[in-house]
Each structure stands twice: as C-alpha cells, then as structure tokens.
Image (tube, rainbow, N blue to C red):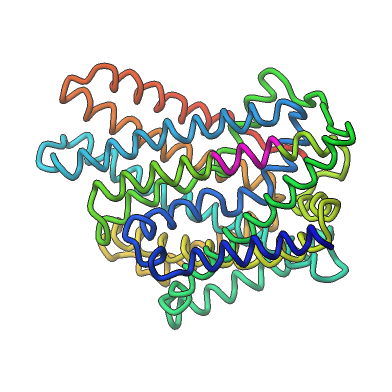
C-alpha cells in the first residue's frame, strides 16, 4: 500500500513539474520534449522484457550498446544540422541528393513505425479486457484505429489532436518516473533478502548482435530535432537532441539494470505486453498506469508520425502526393504489416528502415566533413554509415 502511494506521489509530482508554466514554456525544454518523447515512448514498453529474456545479466550491456550506437547516429545528424545552418550554399549536388533520398527513407520508416505504434496499441488495448494474448483480436483493434486515423486525416487533419501532444508526453514521462520508483523499491527489497537474479544470456555471438540491431527503433526518435527548423534555431536543436539522448540513455540504463537483476528469464512468457505481468509483481498500481501510458503514447506517436509522413511525402513529391493520399498509403501498408507480421517482426522492420535513414545521414555528414578536411569526422561518420547499412541488412526480430 505504501509503495502504491509512493508511486502515485511520484507520478503526480513529475506531472505537476512538467506542466508548470516555467518549465513547459522554456524554449530548450520544449525543444527537448519532442525527441525525448520519441526515444522513450514505445521502446520503453518492449525493451525491458525483450532484453531480460534474451540477454539475462548482460541486458545492461546490450542497452548500453544500443544507446551508444544511437548517440553515434545522433552525432551525424547534429553535424548535418550545423552544416546546413552555416554552409547551405556550399553543399554539393551529391549531398543534396543523398539528403533527398534520406527524406524518402524517413518517410517510409514513418509508415513502419506507425504500424509498430498501433500494433502495440492493439495489444495493450486488449489488456483492459479478457482477450489479452488474442493476436487476431489485437489486429482487429489495430485495424479499427488505422481506419479512424485515415478518416480523421482525410477529412479534418490532425491539428486538434496534435495540440494534445504535450499533455500526452507529460503523462507518459510522469508514469515512467512512477515505474522507476516502484522498481527501485522492489530492487531494494530483493537485494536486502538476497534474491537478486543473475541469469545467463539466451542469445550470444552473431545471434545477439543481429537481435540488438533489430531493436534500434527502441532508441530512435532523436532525429526529430533535425526537422524542427521552423520553430528552433540550429543551436537549440543540437543542444536539445544531445540532452534528450543523455536523459533517455540514463533512464533506459537504470531501467534495464533494475529489470535484469530482479526478474529471471522465464518469469513470464515473452510477449509485447509482458511488461504488464512483470510490473504487477512490483506493485498492483503499475499495470493500470502502464496501460494508460501505452494507449496515450502509442496513439499520440502514431498521429505525429502519420502527420509527419503526409507532409514529408507532399514536399518530396512536389505536391503530386497530397497529405490525404499519403495517409491512405500509410494505412494500406500498415494494415499489410499488421496482418502479415507480429509486433516483434514489425519492430525489426522499423529498426532496419531507420537504420537506412541513419546510414544516409551519416554518409552526408562524412561528405561534409571531407569538404572541410576534418578527417577524424570523416572516419567516424563513414564508419557510422557502414554500421547503419549493416543494421539495415542484418537486423533480426526476436521470436515471441
């Protein structure tokens, strides 16, 4: 009972802090919120059980590797933000073409990510009733939400829903704070009783690396800062992206270290909603909070990426593809993924799609660095481009 009260107190305190006008109105924080919410959104729901199930005591190392790779790609994107701001007129035709190709890659990555968000929405939505684990029922719910999004986007657009984004983000971050409070208390209790778990890894070698590559989308989202130029200057976008990656990495590493040490592999069967069963052991209040966070986070993220893809495809096609037609394409492809793949397979597809985008961004950064004879940066971003291509080719899904 006391732990439930402590968790609720943490959730309310963090929510009030995030909604305080001095913070919510601060320019840097507003710039941080968009990438931060993307990075620790959907990924937070699946990464804990997945890494715990696959890597046991080595889960924190796998999480650290994911954060490090994401930071490397983030460095390339930040470099490009600075270069575009100060040397737009110096960019070569190759850079411009790669940038356009990267934008197309991002547009298609959005399509896969929306399918990822809404399939998680369907899985967590069923947890409110008695049909959790029914794959077809989850797909039907996901299909219904896809249809709603298409109808709203086709007839009215998403401006009204987008205005709710900061509230949804604040709620999600507050609930994550409550979850961490619960996990820390549970960890302390088990440590005091000598009940911490040191489980061996189920995946090793190349198998482990391919799976880790297939989880890249769980730390994706920092690149959104690249496209906030109409609202924030280059310096603010660079600082906000870096801060968002630092904060999200710290949260992820603490979260994964705690789950790896208090849950043994096989504690619960691995599924997209396994975190609900895991957290019900920690505190009775956590499953309900997690479902609320999952539903609001997945829906708001799907709206944001649907709107973003519509605008992106319209711009790239020279207005030949209207936003509503882009929404229809997104929904059609999303439904194909929904009915032909499970959530973990969609996660791997999304990771590979974003890896291609990051590889192109890193290649652009390497070319820009070569132009200014910064050879260390050329080597770093060249290696990042090769890594991104490798992830795009070899990233794998975990079998649920």
Task: State the residue at coordinates (76%, 51%).
Answer: 275
Name the main secondary structure of what is drawn in magenta: helix
For the record, the magenta segment spans 250-257
Query: Which x, y percent locates residue 126?
Result: 78, 67
Q: Quadrant of the C terminus?
A: top right
Instruction: Please state the total of marks drawn on the protein image.
Output: 0
Task: Please tell me whether residue 254 belongs to the stretch shown in magenta.
Answer: yes
Taking depth in this image into account, of 223 and 114 the one nearest to the observer is 223
Q: Describe residue 83's horizontal placement relative to residue 241 as left or right.
A: left
Query: Which x, y percent locates residue 309?
Result: 42, 60
Please, is residue 64 above or below residue 279 in the view? above
Q: Quadrant of the N terminus?
A: bottom right
Q: Describe residue 306's horizontal placement relative to residue 75 as left or right.
A: right
Task: Please tell me whether residue 348 belongs to the stretch shown in magenta.
Answer: no
Task: State the residue at coordinates (40%, 46%).
Answer: 223
Taking depth in this image into account, of 76 and 114 the one nearest to the observer is 76
Taking depth in this image into account, of 17 and 346 the one nearest to the observer is 17
Occupied quadrant, residue 230: bottom left
């Amino acid at each position: 009972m006391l732990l439930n009260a402590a968790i609720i107190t943490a959730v309310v305190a963090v929510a009030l802090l995030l909604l305080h006008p001095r913070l919510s109105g601060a320019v840097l924080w507003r710039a941080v919120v968009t990438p931060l919410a993307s990075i620790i959104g959907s990924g937070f729901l699946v990464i804990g059980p997945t890494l715990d199930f696959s890597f046991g005591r080595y889960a924190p190392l796998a999480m650290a590797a994911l954060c490090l790779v994401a930071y490397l790609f983030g460095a390339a994107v930040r470099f490009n933000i600075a270069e575009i701001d100060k040397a737009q007129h110096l960019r070569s035709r190759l850079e411009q073409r790669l940038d356009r190709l990267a934008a197309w890659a991002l547009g298609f990555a959005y399509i896969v990510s929306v399918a990822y968000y809404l399939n998680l929405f369907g899985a967590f939505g069923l947890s409110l009733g008695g049909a959790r684990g029914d794959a077809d029922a989850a797909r039907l719910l996901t299909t219904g939400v896809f249809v709603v999004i298409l109808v709203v986007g086709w007839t009215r657009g998403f401006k009204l829903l987008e205005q709710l984004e900061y509230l949804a983000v604040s709620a999600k971050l507050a609930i994550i704070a409550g979850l961490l409070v619960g996990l820390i208390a549970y960890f302390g209790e088990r440590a005091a009783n000598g009940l911490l778990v040191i489980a061996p890894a189920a995946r090793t070698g190349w198998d482990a690396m391919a799976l880790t590559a297939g989880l890249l989308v769980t730390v994706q989202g920092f690149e959104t800062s690249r496209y906030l130029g109409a609202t924030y200057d280059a310096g603010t976008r660079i600082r906000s992206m870096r801060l968002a990656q630092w904060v999200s990495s710290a949260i992820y590493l603490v979260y994964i270290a705690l789950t790896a040490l208090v849950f043994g592999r096989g504690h619960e069967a691995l599924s997209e909603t396994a975190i609900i069963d895991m957290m019900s052991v920690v505190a009775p209040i956590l499953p309900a909070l997690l479902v609320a966070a999952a539903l609001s986070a997945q829906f708001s993220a799907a709206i944001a990426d649907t709107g973003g893809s519509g605008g992106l495809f319209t711009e790239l096609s020279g207005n030949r593809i209207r936003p509503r037609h882009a929404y229809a394409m997104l929904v059609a492809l999303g439904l194909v993924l929904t009915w032909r793949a499970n959530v973990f397979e969609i996660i791997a597809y999304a990771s590979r799609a974003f890896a291609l985008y990051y590889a192109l961004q890193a290649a652009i950064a390497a070319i820009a660095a070569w132009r200014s004879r910064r050879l260390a940066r050329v080597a770093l971003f060249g290696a990042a481009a090769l890594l991104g291509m490798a992830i795009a080719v070899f990233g794998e899904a975990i079998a649920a």
